[in-house]
Image (cartoon, rainbow, N blue to C red):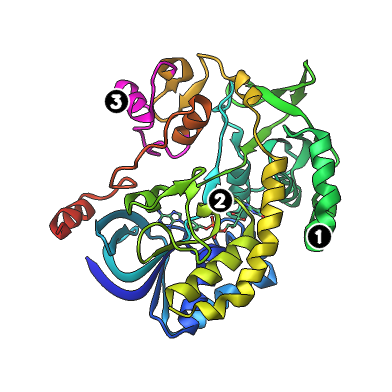
Amino acid sequence: MHTHHCDVLILGAGPAGLAAALAAARCGRQVIILDDNPRPGGQIWRDGPRVQLPALARRYQSAVANAPNIRLLSGARLIARPSAQSVLYETAEKSGIVHWQRLILCCGARELFLPFPGWTLPGVTGAGGLQAQIKHGLTLRGERVVIAGSGPLLLAAASTVGKAGGKVVAVIEQAPRAALLRFAAGLWRWPDKLRQLCTLMPGHLHTASQVIEARGEDRLQTVLVRHAGETREIPCDRLATGYGLIPNLEPGLIFGCATLHDALRVDEQQRTSVENIFAAGECTGFGGSELALAEGEIAGYVAAERPEAARQAIARRQRWRRFARALNRTFILPDALKQVVTPQTLLCRCEDIRCGDVQDATCWQEAKLSQRCGMGACQGRSCAASARWLYGWPLPQPREPLSPARTETLIALAKSAP
Ligand SMILES: Cc1cc2nc3c(=O)[nH]c(=O)nc-3n(C[C@H](O)[C@H](O)[C@H](O)COP(=O)(O)OP(=O)(O)OC[C@H]3O[C@@H](n4cnc5c(N)ncnc54)[C@H](O)[C@@H]3O)c2cc1C
């Protein structure tokens, strides 16, 4: 068991975490970053053998690597909170405890999946999940790919698929055409985003449309798409779906941080409701990497007690908050999307629980206790959010350990209890 001490602990090495670390380190603080990925960069700058990272990402990574007062613990998952100012983590080889003075939560977001008939067939993945596989070396060599759901991640995924040799046969976006046109017309305020949209715009974009079923024997062969009451079948080899992102709240919740609209609640200085705990980036709400960088920098300076150094970042945050609001307005999910779910639709793929098995439950805890929903290998990482969106259940309080852990780590947790 390793024990570390630091002034500022940062959970997450995405854009927000890297910016927070550099700001706090510039003020002379001893910083530790804990991240469960093998390399820093988070989701958007996920590194891998097939990845050519943008110059900005490389600048942040090398600045962090060269800062003598930043220590990066990669491949390290947060397991529990042994005390009010420490965390227990686990890597493939060891476990350890970090004692901190200030904590900055930069733990990002994950994809929201909407279950529909056939969504667990081999060949169906998340849109970001397929991107991650490609970045880790998957090639698609002429495979026909349908990308479906909602939000800008679909366009990013389509571009990644094209670069990996796949053929994007359709991008199915639930938002109506009018909303997308309004959004595009307002992009002159963010010229880089307008340029990005022009580069990424796919040829086969279908708006106001939804995949209602994935079909195939042993693996995916076709998808059924509904548009304006009509249904058509598209042959394909892969389907990548995603209905936007949901903040990773669990680390904040185990420390008692308050939430607002299913994101960690922060004030203008990125402080959470708990003293000495800050949050930045997409665990505080969806807004893109530019907003995450600005928020991370502010949190880093404020945590290091140099709030006056955050002035420029505060102006940047203002600009990107407006962009985030425009995004969130455009890609809002209407309740009508839920109509694809049938009682037979699989909800928890680890434990084989169908939507009909839990439809009378009144909360996540009840679904877990009565049906084992979410009690399998992934511990409800995807089905808990899907179920909450489908049934409007209250936000559940996570329990420690936050993820499956080795016995020695659990023993260490018991021994470290105050
Ligand atoms: C799957 C996915 C793919 C995306 N792809 C794109 C894209 O191609 N283009 C784009 O513009 N935007 C993309 N986004 C959006 C993008 O993630 C954000 O705009 C930006 O990266 C947010 O930065 P962040 O620092 O807030 O969080 P993230 O980049 O998500 O970083 C959070 C980090 O915290 C780590 N973490 C979380 N919980 C724990 C824990 N318990 N223990 C240890 N570490 C933890 C995560 O592994 C991650 O490394 C994607 C999002 C997702 C979820």
Q: Is residue 295 magenta?
A: no
Q: Position of residue 74 (x, y in %)?
A: 42, 65
In this figure, which residue is indicated by the disc labeled 1? 189
Between discs 2 and 3, the one toward the N terminus: 2
Q: Residue at x 66, y 63 (%)?
A: 318
Q: Is residue 369 magenta?
A: yes
Indicate which disc residue 341 carries.
Answer: none
Q: Residues within 10 Å of mark 3 (few under 14, many from 20)?
A: few
CA separation, marks 1 and 2?
Answer: 21 Å
CA separation, marks 3 and 1?
Answer: 50 Å
Mark 1: amino acid: Arg
Between discs 1 and 2, the one toward the N terminus: 1
Element type where label 2 sits in the image:
loop
CA separation, marks 2 and 3?
Answer: 30 Å
Task: Decide which of 364, 356 is in the foreground and name it.
Answer: 364
Indicate which disc residue 285 carries.
Answer: 2
Mark 2: amino acid: Gly
Task: Decide which of 99, 115 is in the foreground and name it.
Answer: 99
Q: Quadrant of ligand 1?
A: bottom right
Mark 3: amino acid: Leu
Q: Residues within 10 Å of mark 1 (few under 14, many from 20)?
A: few
What type of secondary structure mainly makes up the magenta span? loop
In this figure, which residue is indicated by the disc labeled 3? 369
Image height check: is 260 above or below 366?
Answer: below
